[in-house]
């Protein structure tokens, strides 16, 4: 009885009632806080750019609110749809994302020397964002089907490597090295926890390293970006411009920042992509170290709660899906933050839930909704065991 009472107290502290059932309170709170930060910081960061382009000061804010509205629908879909449904949709969603990446080669829209967007007239989508989520769902399904054979090279490693290579190739021709690295890192982490031999993953690392180095060496712009990463100051008016001004923003904000709307780098136009890839330096300049620390804490909460959900779920697909979704959010947040403080070369990766943009935000919200749905099962293992009866029998798909 005492154990049951303790479990009930834990459940009440960590779960909140919703129209779709009890869901993780910490994840819901962290997402709301990050979205609130997004609205405030994007409005602040885009007042200057909007005015210089003869647009209303609220132009970007209205667009971001629209994206959040669509993202909320995606979150509700992810939270409402039973996570077992994604097991059935794994291969169709994967094939759809690959088809969209192929379509980019023919009708993609170019921006910033990259062809990463499909213009639908009323909306522009970035297929690589869907590809990340699709790849996680595919890996969770495939690993769950082959749990007992993950140490086999031909069954547990090679098929996943083949799918990774196809998606990476389609991303690299855009070019989009950042997404390719995210996909490779996701596969390594998911296969590692699934029991794949470390030697197979080392083969992937040492085999892929020359390809990545060759991809960088094949472009003078990418070489300059790497040189700017090593020492940005000699290139402060070229490839090092963003890094130098991001560091200036972070450092000038001090402990508490200049205040919302008082940032000099973003409002003055000295920090390119301030509303998207470099939103974190805007937080640092206007809210100081305290603001960055709070944003970091919110992502730590998401990662810890996601890992807890993955640990508690009993069936294989749910466990690997929760882990993959958590790593998808955590990896992107970690890389974006590392770029913002000069620890990594500049990449076109947004900060989940905070950066301006449609595709990234909507996919992140869908992933969060799926994680919330999974959280319902983290505290109902007995139901989870019953769910296993509906899954593909042992052996599954090859």
Image (tube, rainbow, N blue to C red):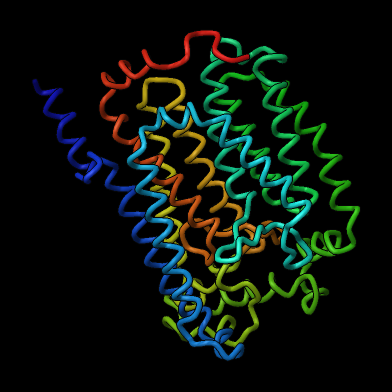
* 207 relative to 243 in the view: left or right: right
What residue appears at the point 54 percent right and 12 percent down from the top-left corner? 396
Exactly how many numbered labels are in the figure? 0
Q: Is residue 138 visible?
A: yes
The front one of 267 and 72 is 72
Q: Quadrant of the C terminus?
A: top right
Q: Report x, y in % for residue 67.
A: 46, 63
What residue appears at the point 26 percent right and 26 percent down from the top-left corner? 380
Q: Report x, y in % for residue 130.
A: 58, 46
Position of 210 relative to 282 (above/below)? above
Q: Report x, y in % for residue 173.
A: 80, 50
Q: Is residue 294 visible?
A: no
* 161 relative to 248 in the view: left or right: right
Q: Report x, y in % for residue 343.
A: 66, 58
User: Quadrant location of residue 30?
Assistant: bottom left
What residue appears at the point 67 percent right and 14 percent down from the top-left corner? 155
Q: Quadrant of the N terminus?
A: top left
**Residue at the limit of the structure toward the front, as seen here:** 121
What residue appears at the point 40 percent right and 32 percent down from the top-left corner? 83
**Residue at the limit of the structure toward the left, as seen here:** 1
User: Quadrant location of residue 388?
Assistant: top left
Position of 105 relative to 13 (above/below)? below
């Amino acid at each position: 009885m005492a154990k049951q009472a303790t479990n009930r107290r834990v459940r009440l502290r960590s779960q909140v009632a919703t129209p779709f059932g009890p869901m993780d309170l910490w994840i819901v709170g962290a997402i709301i806080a990050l979205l609130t930060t997004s609205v405030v910081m994007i409005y602040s960061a885009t007042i200057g750019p909007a005015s210089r382009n003869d647009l209303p000061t609220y132009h970007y804010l209205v667009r971001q609110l629209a994206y959040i509205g669509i993202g909320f629908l995606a979150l509700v879909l992810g939270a409402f749809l039973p996570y077992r449904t994604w097991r059935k949709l794994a291969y169709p969603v994967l094939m759809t994302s690959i088809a969209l990446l192929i379509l980019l080669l023919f009708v993609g829209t170019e921006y910033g020397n990259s062809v990463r967007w499909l213009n639908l007239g009323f909306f522009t989508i970035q297929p690589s964002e869907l590809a990340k989520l699709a790849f996680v769902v595919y890996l969770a399904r495939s690993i769950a089907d082959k749990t007992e054979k993950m140490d086999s090279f031909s069954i547990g490693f090679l098929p996943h490597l083949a799918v990774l290579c196809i998606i990476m190739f389609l991303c690299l021709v855009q070019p989009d090295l950042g997404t390719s690295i995210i996909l490779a890192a996701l596969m390594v982490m998911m296969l590692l926890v699934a029991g794949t031999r470390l030697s197979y993953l080392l083969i992937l690392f040492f085999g892929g390293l020359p390809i990545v180095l060759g991809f960088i060496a094949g472009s003078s712009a990418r070489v300059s970006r790497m040189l700017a990463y090593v020492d940005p100051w000699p290139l402060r008016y070229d490839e090092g411009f963003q890094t130098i001004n991001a560091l200036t923003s972070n450092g000038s904000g001090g402990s508490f920042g200049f205040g919302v709307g008082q940032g000099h780098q973003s409002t003055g136009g000295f920090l390119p992509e301030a509303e998207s890839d470099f939103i974190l330096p805007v937080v640092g300049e206007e809210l100081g170290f305290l603001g960055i620390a709070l944003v970091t804490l919110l992502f730590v909460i998401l990662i810890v709660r996601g890992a807890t959900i993955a640990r508690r779920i009993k069936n294989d697909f749910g466990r690997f899906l929760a882990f993959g979704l958590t790593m998808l959010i955590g990896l992107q947040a970690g890389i974006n933050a590392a770029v913002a403080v000069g620890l990594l070369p500049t990449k076109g990766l947004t900060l989940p839930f905070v950066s301006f943009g449609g595709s990234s935000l909507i996919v992140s919200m869908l992933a969060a909704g799926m994680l919330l749905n999974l959280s319902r099962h983290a505290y109902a293992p007995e139901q989870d065991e019953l769910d296993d009866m509906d899954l593909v029998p042992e052996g599954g798909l090859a």
